[in-house]
Image (cartoon, rainbow, N blue to C red):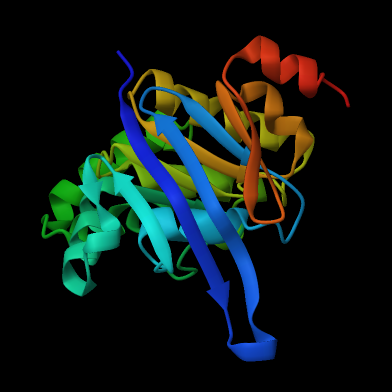
């Protein structure tokens, strides 16, 4: 059963001061549920990544409520946010951010080692998740020996390995071709449905829209439309358009 995992209300964010001040988010509201893949879409510069960063706790809002898994991130500071993020969030980026000198298994193991697991236990868990993303035969490869699609699957495995309830994705397919992008989105859908994660994907790649269960559309720092069903998504964003 789905439950509310992200609840953002009346969030403001600006950068700079005086005449150089730029308003990025204006009284923005947004919700997302566990067990679903929710997409946050809109043109470049509309505030998507800023909102994602606020939800992740890596950027402070100027005002508003940011509630994640029932916890008020807007009332947390410093080490409390860092601990919450390490325990509850997994991240997938446009750039894969793999450590080039580490194998796929070692890259995936990193979050577990940071949490204090022994290298042996971390490696065993990493290999299990690499098998789930279809890369058991590349477990000992360095990133340079893998394609972009394979590297992104390693990044997905790394995000999932510590079993976080929320996966945050910033343009995870924009540097991939259609086939690899489709494979990545299939895996993210499976993470939502099979692993009961809340998967939030920021994107302006319209090839990915058909994978969404819910969608929020942004423009000029505000969410102007929320699509709550696949039928609504297909109506406003028909395949191939």
Q: Residue at x 69, y 15 (%)?
A: 232
Viewer-side residue, 61 vs 85: 61
Q: Position of residue 212 (x, y in %)?
A: 60, 25
| Residue 148 as seen in the image, left or right of residue 8 | right
Q: Position of residue 25 (x, y in %)?
A: 58, 60
Residue 69, image quadrant:
top left
Quadrant for the C terminus in the image:
top right
Q: Is residue 138 visible?
A: no
Q: Residue at x 50, y 69 (%)?
A: 100
Q: Is residue 239 visible?
A: yes
| Residue 9 as seen in the image, left or right of residue 170 | left
Residue 197, image quadrant:
top left
Quadrant for the N terminus in the image:
top left
Q: Residue at x 77, y 35 (%)?
A: 206
Which residue appears farthest toward the top when viewing the image? 231
Using the image, determine if residue 235 lies above or below residue 174. Answer: above
Using the image, determine if residue 20 lies above or below residue 202. Answer: below
| Residue 192 as seen in the image, left or right of residue 207 | left
């Amino acid at each position: 059963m789905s439950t509310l995992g992200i609840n953002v209300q009346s969030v403001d964010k600006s950068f700079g001061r005086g005449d150089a001040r730029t308003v990025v988010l204006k009284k923005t509201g947004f919700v997302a549920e566990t067990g679903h893949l929710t997409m946050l879409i809109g043109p470049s510069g509309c505030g998507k990544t800023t909102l994602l960063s606020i939800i992740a706790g890596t950027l402070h809002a100027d005002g508003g409520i940011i509630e994640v898994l029932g916890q008020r991130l807007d009332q947390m500071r410093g080490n409390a946010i860092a601990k919450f993020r390490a325990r509850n969030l997994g991240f997938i980026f446009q750039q894969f951010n793999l450590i080039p000198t580490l194998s796929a298994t070692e890259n995936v193991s990193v979050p577990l080692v940071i949490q204090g697991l022994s290298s042996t236990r971390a490696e065993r868990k990493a290999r299990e998740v690499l098998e789930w993303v279809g890369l058991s035969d590349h477990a000992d490869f360095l990133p340079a020996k893998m394609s972009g699609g394979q590297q992104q699957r390693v990044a997905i495995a790394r995000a999932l390995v510590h079993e976080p309830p929320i996966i945050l994705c910033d343009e995870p397919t924009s540097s991939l071709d259609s086939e690899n992008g489709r494979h990545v989105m299939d895996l993210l859908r499976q993470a939502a449905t099979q692993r009961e994660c809340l998967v939030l994907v920021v994107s302006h790649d319209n090839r990915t829209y058909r994978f969404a269960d819910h969608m929020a559309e942004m423009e000029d720092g505000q969410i102007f439309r929320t699509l709550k069903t696949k039928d609504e998504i297909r109506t406003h964003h028909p395949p191939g358009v």
